[in-house]
Amino acid sequence: MARLHNFSAGPAVLPVSVVEELRDNLLDLNGSGIGLMEISHRSKTYQAVVDGAVARTRRVLGVPDDYTVLFLQGGASLQFYMTALNLLRPGEQADYLVTGTWAQKAIKEAKRIGDAKAIWDDAPNHFKRVPQNGEYTVRDGAVYLHYTSNNTIYGTEYHHRPDAQGHPLVADLSSDIAGVPVDIAAHDLVYAGAQKNLGPSGVTVVILSPWAMSRVPDGLPAMLDYKVHAKDGSMYNTPNCVGIYVIDRVFAWMEANGGLEGAIARNRQKAGTLYGELDRTGFWRPHAEVQSRSVMNVTWRLPDEALEEKFVKEAKAATLDGLKGHRSVGGIRASLYNALGQDSVDALVAFMQEFERKNG
Ligand SMILES: *Cc1c(COP(=O)(O)O)cnc(C)c1O
């Protein structure tokens, strides 16, 4: 079996050792004699998996003890609505930094609940950067400030924590959670679909401060109510059992490989290698402005679309998969998530140099 170099933006590459562990436990979960997809989520064996996943999430990400960790369904896309539904009352204000497609979707859902406002919006500049502190003003009455830490589609990322100007901070961390430094304690609510850095699709990590939990109104529909999910330890209904298992194993893999610090160092190295090639010659046209460049999703254009198509096709033939840019940006996108090795980036850069030599 030949696994390709997988630069997909999500679902994305996972550590081979985790996939092998999953394969074995599909047949027999931790020696229980029952397979992972077949075991009751109410069994002791499975409860230990969830407990382990919560504990590892806390350890690796440095989650404060009084914060709540949940594994929910519906993706980050449901959290766009659920965060507003739980934190905001009709008529109340929430401010958003709109740095890409996912942020646009987040504010759209929040507007269903309250007075959600884009206090910074880079759409006219085609989302080439994120704001620096001081470029926006959070409204006095804003209940929270929401931002998207990494813009998966455009390839931009904050390299500082946005200043919430004294207001609670809410973040969509879907595509760089566990890949870059993060101070969870400085946030009141963060969420992340697992399918970029943490596991398979269909499970979303949500982390809430005591303040966030205290904001949840009574009487919400059960599946949209953080208090209901917290009370039942993410098992109000049948959870994504396989997804939570994989998250636990991915965090265990991180702990065995230098923890969050190790991942950060490897990601910087990988991104440095690729941006080094993008800056080497004018043949490549990087999308993001330099100070906002993402370490997780690297986006660039070629001189014309025909060359871009050729690039993607020939890359695939050279075992480099998933490089076609999102349709809203076009061009090329290489996602360098935690489980992608430096060897894959080296192979990509070697291919790029050869491609430029032939077509430049
Ligand atoms: C992928 C992604 C989403 C969407 O996640 P789903 O789990 O598909 O809903 C939202 N935000 C960001 C930043 C993403 O990268």
Image: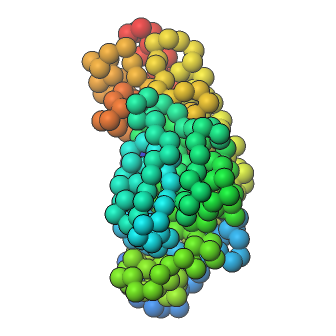
Residue occupying image coordinates x 37% and y 59%: 111
- Between residue 101 and residue 192, name the one nearer to us: 101
Q: Can residue 256 be seen in this view?
A: no
Residue occupying image coordinates x 49% and y 59%: 94
Residue occupying image coordinates x 46% and y 40%: 121
- Between residue 347 and residue 287, name the one nearer to us: 287
Location of residue 243 with respect to 334 vertically, above or below:
below
The location of residue 87, given as percent across then percent down, is: 50, 70
Residue occupying image coordinates x 38% and y 44%: 101
Examine the image and state in which quarter residue 328 appears: top left
Extreme-bottom residue of the structure: 43
- Between residue 345 and residue 232, name the one nearer to us: 232
Location of residue 11 with respect to 267 vertically, above or below:
below
* Horizontal side, residue 356 vs residue 130: left or right: left
Examine the image and state in which quarter residue 26 appears: bottom left
The location of residue 144, given as percent across then percent down, is: 56, 61
Question: How many circles with numbers are drawn on the protein?
Answer: 0
Q: Is residue 217 visible?
A: yes
* Horizontal side, residue 269 vs residue 224: left or right: right
Colouring scheme applied when the structure was drawn: rainbow
The location of residue 323, given as percent across then percent down, is: 39, 34
Examine the image and state in which quarter residue 332 appears: top left
Location of residue 221 with respect to 93 vertically, above or below:
below
**The C terminus, quarter of image:** top left
The location of residue 104, given as percent across then percent down, is: 39, 48
